[in-house]
């Protein structure tokens, strides 16, 4: 490989680590998958004469083990997609029409800086960033982006759209997103896969679960839908949506009543057991079964099996969080391993997210200290306002002061945010200045005033933590940028430089740091979890495992399988214990004990609404998409074929609907069209609709979020996508004709996150 001169490039770094290798010959470059998946795979990118020709899983990285999902194995189709945005684009038609003309970077940056500067000098809180997990990297995710908006004094974004309900539940109970090492599941004897379909969403965990099954472990899926994962488990618990907390409390009742609580462990390492015991006493299996719509015998038998099996592990995921009581559900489930003493075993306990095992240094990474102490529009010393991304439709229409500018990166809110009617109305405001950093002309990009071409993962440098395992990964650029695309980090650097003459805060040196420096700043390398390695080692090897977070564990690169980090407590709660009763929630005026919180919309909580819309809708991800990413990749969209909705045979028969027909799914918020699949894999009175299609690639021009609402969860202010009543009926002939025209339209647009 030819030596690389350390000169500043469009990739925004002077460090050779951030520059693509020589463009001649064939070589392999190590990278990392950037997408919103717990597995965060290590990649090997084969480059031939400057063009990436193959993307594979790295066989040397233990969690990846040479395996990639179908989506990422086709990553070259994304990078070289004919619909890539390769130049700055200026809107010339109505918002939403997708009519743009090519412009230069100077024209784009000058106009954007002028418009943002004018607003910032009046009140920077009228500028809102909107971003999420289109890339999970420290550099191209929130590294330079957060620094830019902090220095500007813009509104802060409450990034709630995926995991904040569960995060709040975990923080109240275990102190944060910590738990057992996912690699230890292979040694478990009983695995509860709760609110998760890992065959779709975490293929590497599923491989571990399958190996545990071959060794004799029992697998139980708890999910309203008999997913591909549930089909391959020994047992499926088909509970109603939004009733997971009731099921967990019913299990807790049985554990206590049957004397299966590990009192030695609980007395030493749990806080509030007597109060929790009293709460669980109200949840006899018969009551839990009635709420959940499952047999009482199933609640009782599974609880006894869980309390009698060592080691027993729970793989919790995000599906069960997306109803009103999602935070409390996580709290209730997180108490079960404490009751059973499961934390004593390295292959026992619970795993939701491993994010808390990484020593992220927010102060040096995103630089909140850059927020000006005084700024027009807010009181001295006050922080800029917070805007919840899950209610962006409402915020765009009703925020006070109004949102005048929106800068979107790493997200596609027009497709992914709930209650599309309000989101679309907000994005179509003529007085809203909208800038979108993107790879493709997504639904959101169609509504922008400026679309700026961003690099893909194969074209830029980044550093990634994970939420499914404990390995830090580095991503080196494999090829040069396509067209005039720039990394997010460089776009924000250039905008900051243009704003600095009129806004001195934008001239801070932190806004000029290169990508390699941002990656280094994201991690506290002196923390014991990372102190056994170094940044240089990470860049050299491509990955580095974090040490266990529990007490008394010596940092080591290769951790012994016998380590059980919380065998002796040491949770990152204020008490160091599992907080079954949370003093912090009590201080906030909230119920300190977990309980079942009924859905916003259900037969039980809103009977009048349920008479009009009697089906509870959940909208899990389609197997070949990643949220709204990859929808434009033709081979993956062909595998999905078209939007689908599943109904139980009894529900289809009651409506006179036939499998294979096109149907209308609707409520008072809107409607979308889908192909009906009649299947007993979905439970009665539940509609399972698969997402997230782009609106413009869906029949009828709307996806599942046309019917979801903006009501939030009990904890974490998260969206309630799976807390949604609908009705389903046959589609009229006129609508079918219109859908056929949409389906026949050429799909030369691309995927945002």
Image: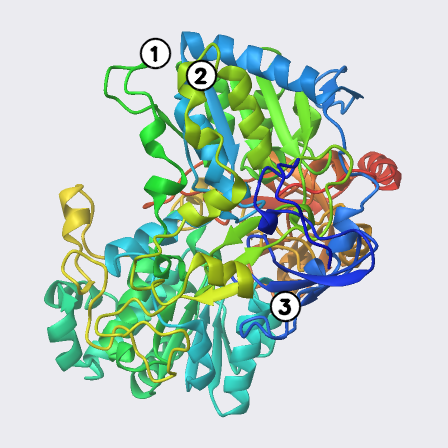
Disc number at residue 377?
Answer: 1
Q: Nearer the viewer, mark 3 or mark 2?
A: 2
Which residue does the numbered mark 2 point to in the structure image? 126
Which residue does the numbered mark 3 point to in the structure image? 680
Sequence-earlier tag: 3 or 1: 1
Place of residue 56 in the rendered image (x, y in percent of width and height, measured from the top left): 70, 66
Q: CA distance from mark 2 to mark 1?
A: 9 Å
Left/right of residue 415 with respect to residue 264 in the rendered view: right
Left/right of residue 27 with respect to residue 265 in the rendered view: right
Q: In the picture, residue 94 is in which quadrant? A: top right
Left/right of residue 349 with respect to residue 574 in the rendered view: right
Place of residue 539 in the rendered image (x, y in percent of width and height, measured from the top left): 53, 58
- Neighbor class of circle 2 (other Cα within 10 Å; few <14, some 14-19, many 20+) is many
Q: CA distance from mark 3 to mark 1?
A: 56 Å
Foreground residue among 431 and 355: 355
Question: Secondary structure beneath disc 2?
Answer: helix
Question: Secondary structure beneath disc 3?
Answer: loop
């Amino acid at each position: 490989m030819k030596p690389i001169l350390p000169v500043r490039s469009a990739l925004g770094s002077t460090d050779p680590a951030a520059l693509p290798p020589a463009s001649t010959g064939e070589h392999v470059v190590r990278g990392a998958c950037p997408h919103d998946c717990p597995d965060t795979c290590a990649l090997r990118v084969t480059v031939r004469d400057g063009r990436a020709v193959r993307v594979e899983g790295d066989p040397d990285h233990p969690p990846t083990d040479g395996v990639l999902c179908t989506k990422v194995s086709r990553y070259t189709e994304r990078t070289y997609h004919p619909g890539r945005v390769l130049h700055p684009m200026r809107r010339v038609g109505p918002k939403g029409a997708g009519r743009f003309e090519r412009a230069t970077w100077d024209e784009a940056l000058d106009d954007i800086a002028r418009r943002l500067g004018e607003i910032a000098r009046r009140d920077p809180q009228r500028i809102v960033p909107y971003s999420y997990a289109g890339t999970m990297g420290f550099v191209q995710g929130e590294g330079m982006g957060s620094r830019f908006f902090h220095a500007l004094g813009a509104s802060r974004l409450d990034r709630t759209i995926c995991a904040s309900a569960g995060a709040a539940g975990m923080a109240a109970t275990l102190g944060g997103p910590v738990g057992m090492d996912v690699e230890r599941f292979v040694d478990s004897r009983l695995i509860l896969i709760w609110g998760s379909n890992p065959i779709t969403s975490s293929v590497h965990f599923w491989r571990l679960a399958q190996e545990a099954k071959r060794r004799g472990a029992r697998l139980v899926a708890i999910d309203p839908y008999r997913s591909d994962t549930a089909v391959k488990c020994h047992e499926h618990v088909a509970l109603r949506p939004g009733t997971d907390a009731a099921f967990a409390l019913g299990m807790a009742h049985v554990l206590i009543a049957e004397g299966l609580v590990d009192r030695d462990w609980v007395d030493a390492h749990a806080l509030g057991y007597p109060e929790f015991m009293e709460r669980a006493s109200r949840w006899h299996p018969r009551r839990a079964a009635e709420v959940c719509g499952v047999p009482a015998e199933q609640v009782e038998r599974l609880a006894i099996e869980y309390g009698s099996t060592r080691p027993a592990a729970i793989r919790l995921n995000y599906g069960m969080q997306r109803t009103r009581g999602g935070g409390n559900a996580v709290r209730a489930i997180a108490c079960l391993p404490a009751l059973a003493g499961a934390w004593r075993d390295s292959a026992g306990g619970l795993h939701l997210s491993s994010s808390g095992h990484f020593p992220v240094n927010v102060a040096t990474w995103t630089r909140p200290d850059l927020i000006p102490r005084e700024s027009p529009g807010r009181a001295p010393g006050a922080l800029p306002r917070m805007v919840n991304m899950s209610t962006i439709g409402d915020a765009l229409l009703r925020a006070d002061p109004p949102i005048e500018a929106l800068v979107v990166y790493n997200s596609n809110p027009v497709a992914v945010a709930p209650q599309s009617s309000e989101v679309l109305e907000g994005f179509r405001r003529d007085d809203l200045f909208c800038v979108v950093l993107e790879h493709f002309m997504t639904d959101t990009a169609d509504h922008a005033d400026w679309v700026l071409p961003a690099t893909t993962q194969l074209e830029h440098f980044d550093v990634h933590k994970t939420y499914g395992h404990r390995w830090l990964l580095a991503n080196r650029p494999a090829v040069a940028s396509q067209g005039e695309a720039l990394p997010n980090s460089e776009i924000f650097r250039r905008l900051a430089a243009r704003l600095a003459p009129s806004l001195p805060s934008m001239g801070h040196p932190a806004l000029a740091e290169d990508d390699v420096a941002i990656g280094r700043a994201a991690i506290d390398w002196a923390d014991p979890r990372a102190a056994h390695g170094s940044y240089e080692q990470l860049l050299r090897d491509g990955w580095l495992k974090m040490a266990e977070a529990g007490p008394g564990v010596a940092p080591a690169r290769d951790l012994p399988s016998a380590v059980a980090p919380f065998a002796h407590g040491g949770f990152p709660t204020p008490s160091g214990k599992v907080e079954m009763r949370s003093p912090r929630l009590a201080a906030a005026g909230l119920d300190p004990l977990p309980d079942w919180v009924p859905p916003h919309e259900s037969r039980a909580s809103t009977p009048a609404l349920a008479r009009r819309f009697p089906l509870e809708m959940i909208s899990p991800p389609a197997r070949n998409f990643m949220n709204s990413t990859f929808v434009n990749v033709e081979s993956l969209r062909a595998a999905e074929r078209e939007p689908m909705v599943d109904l139980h045979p009894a529900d289809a028969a009651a409506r006179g609907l036939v499998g294979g027909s096109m149907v209308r799914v609707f409520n008072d918020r809107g409607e979308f069209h889908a192909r009906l699949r009649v299947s007993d894999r979905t439970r009665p009175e539940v509609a399972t609709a698969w997402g997230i299609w782009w609106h413009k690639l869906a029949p009828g021009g709307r996806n599942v979020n046309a019917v979801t609402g903006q009501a939030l969860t009990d904890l974490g202010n998260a969206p309630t996508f799976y807390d949604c009543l609908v009705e389903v009926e046959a589609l009229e002939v006129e609508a079918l004709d219109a859908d056929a025209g949409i389906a026949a339209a050429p799909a030369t647009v691309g995927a945002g996150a």
